[in-house]
């Protein structure tokens, strides 16, 4: 029977009561994984991003952000809050209950801990991001996940088990003789079509996973990526635990799923990934807009540099038309808004906005590349969201630059040390 969220305390005595509950659930979840039958959903963390104060913006208090989402945050200590929401009970009725806990790592980054089932938890977090310009997911794009694999996971002990998940679906793909009628779904579905009356369109699609010991995957991955471009679309990496059995699955949207038997170890990995992602995003922003001029003075009026993404193969004309018609509708995965202006058969300009903080942006898109001009003050997170979604939904193999620097140079972590063991 699934774990009833009503058992999560809304006002625990302290954070250690929360740790004890999640630690017991982690132990039970790991035992279920080992037996091949889980009785409770796995504990999971969603890493979320807010505005940076480095450009003079005013970060909002956590209570103000979540109160605007009708989630009734209740303070436990200085940085930990319980979050409530509507949940469905065993009889299918909705009631108010604690869904999880939000911890504030710094003024910009939060972690949401929950034991809600994955689909419900993802829907809840996506509603927060969609409804609030103050929040965004942390986007661990394929290049960043690949950098994490190369510099950290692949260097772990040869016998440790890990898993890589690749996901690419060319949702905008259409054959050359197709006529787009505008009736396709705004959102690509994550569920497999199983009924004959809902046939899948014939387009490139890969949802593949490779689970093996570190040594075998390290030996094989390079050659496979060279021979099959969709394997550049890395969606998820399992990070072996440093001290415990099992590991932690990290996906592109900053969801970290605990497959170890320890919540403390899980939280330490969440904080490790927060620090890693924070450094990557700040490096992106410093390079894009310049952190300082001569003698350390700010570069006043600095307008930024472009993000340039070159597609590994040109988009067909129908696919291009489908892409620019659907990619900027309400609720799109790119989280962008604007009205494309046609400049040629396969060239558009878009003067729009990033729904996260409603910062303006300019895009030029052709069948061969995308160029984004993001003005100073736009979250560096936007660069990584664009790249992640382009590889997952448009073209799996890309070359990208921010100004004159390759995108890979931002996302290859340096001097990674094991997660600190904090309490």
Image (tube, helix red, strand yellow):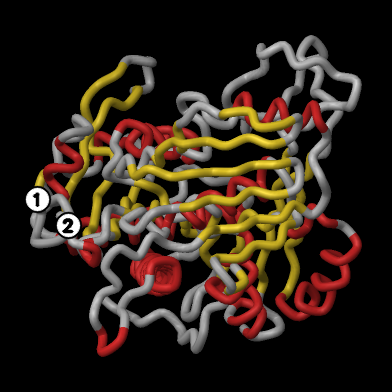
Q: Is residue 394 or residue 297 the one in the foreground? A: 297
Q: Along the horizontal axis of the image, is 142 left or right of 93? A: right
Is residue 122 shown above or below 252?
above
Q: Along the horizontal axis of the image, is 370 left or right of 315? A: left
Query: Considering the numbered disc 2 on the image, is that residue within a helix, a strand or a loop?
Result: strand
Q: Is residue 360 or residue 223 the one in the foreground? A: 360
Where on the picture, by quarter, is residue 126? top left
Is residue 208 shown above or below 294?
above
In the rendered image, is residue 334 in sight? yes
Q: Tell me what residue is drawn at x 64 percent, y 47 percent.
A: 390
Q: Residues within 10 Å of mark 1 (few under 14, many from 20)?
A: some
Q: Residues within 10 Å of mark 2 (few under 14, many from 20)?
A: many
In the rendered image, is residue 1 in sight? no
Is residue 12 shown above or below 68?
below
User: What residue is shown with label 1?
Assistant: 75
Evaluate if marks 1 and 2 touch, with contact meaning CB atoms under 8 Å apart. yes
Q: Tell me what residue is drawn at x 24 percent, y 52 percent.
A: 102
Whichever of labels 1 and 2 marks the residue nearer the N terminus, that label is 1
Residue 391's spot in the image, x, y percent?
A: 67, 50
User: What residue is shown with label 2?
Assistant: 80
Looking at the rendered image, the quarter that the N terminus falls into is top left
Q: Tell me what residue is drawn at x 71 percent, y 62 percent.
A: 399
Query: Considering the numbered disc 1 on the image, is that residue within a helix, a strand or a loop?
Result: strand
Residue 100's spot in the image, x, y percent?
A: 28, 45
Q: Is residue 83 or residue 65 the one in the foreground? A: 65
Residue 278's spot in the image, x, y percent?
A: 37, 69
Q: Tell me what residue is drawn at x 37 percent, y 15 percent.
A: 91
């Amino acid at each position: 029977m699934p774990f009833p969220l009503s058992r999560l305390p809304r006002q625990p005595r302290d954070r250690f009561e929360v740790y004890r509950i999640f630690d017991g659930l982690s132990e039970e979840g790991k035992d279920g994984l080992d037996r091949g039958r889980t009785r409770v959903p796995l504990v999971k963390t969603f890493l979320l991003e807010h505005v940076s104060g480095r450009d003079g913006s005013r970060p909002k208090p956590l209570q103000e952000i979540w109160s605007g989402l009708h989630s009734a945050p209740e303070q436990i200590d200085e940085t930990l809050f319980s979050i409530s929401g509507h949940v469905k009970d065993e009889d299918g009725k909705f009631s108010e209950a604690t869904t999880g806990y939000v911890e504030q790592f710094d003024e910009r980054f939060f972690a949401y801990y929950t034991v809600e089932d994955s689909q419900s938890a993802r829907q809840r977090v996506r509603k927060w991001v969609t409804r609030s310009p103050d929040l965004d997911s942390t986007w661990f794009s394929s290049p960043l996940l690949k950098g994490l694999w190369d510099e950290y996971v692949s260097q772990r002990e040869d016998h440790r088990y890990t898993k890589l998940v690749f996901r690419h679906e060319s949702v905008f793909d259409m054959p050359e003789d197709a006529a787009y009628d505008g009736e396709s779904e705004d959102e690509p579905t994550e569920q497999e079509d199983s009924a004959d009356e809902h046939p899948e369109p014939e387009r490139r699609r890969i949802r593949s996973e490779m689970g093996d010991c570190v040594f075998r995957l390290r030996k094989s991955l390079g050659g496979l990526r060279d021979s099959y471009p969709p394997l550049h679309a890395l969606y998820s990496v399992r990070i072996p635990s440093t001290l415990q059995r099992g590991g932690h699955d990290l996906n592109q949207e900053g969801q970290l799923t605990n497959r170890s038997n320890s919540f403390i170890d899980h939280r330490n990995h969440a904080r490790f990934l927060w620090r890693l992602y924070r450094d990557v995003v700040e490096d992106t922003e410093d390079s894009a807009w310049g952190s300082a001029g001569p003698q350390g003075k700010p570069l006043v009026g600095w307008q930024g540099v472009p993000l340039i993404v070159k597609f590994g193969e040109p988009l067909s004309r129908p696919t291009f038309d489908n892409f620019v018609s659907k990619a900027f509708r309400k609720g799109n995965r790119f989280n962008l808004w604007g009205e494309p202006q046609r400049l040629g058969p396969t060239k558009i300009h878009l003067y729009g906005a990033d729904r996260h903080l409603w910062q303006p942006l300019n895009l030029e898109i052709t069948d061969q590349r995308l160029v984004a001009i993001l003005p100073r003050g736009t979250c560096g997170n936007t660069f990584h969201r664009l790249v992640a979604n382009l590889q997952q939904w448009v073209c799996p193999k890309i070359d990208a630059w921010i100004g004159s620097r390759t995108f890979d140079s931002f996302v290859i972590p340096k001097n990674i040390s094991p997660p600190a063991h904090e309490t």
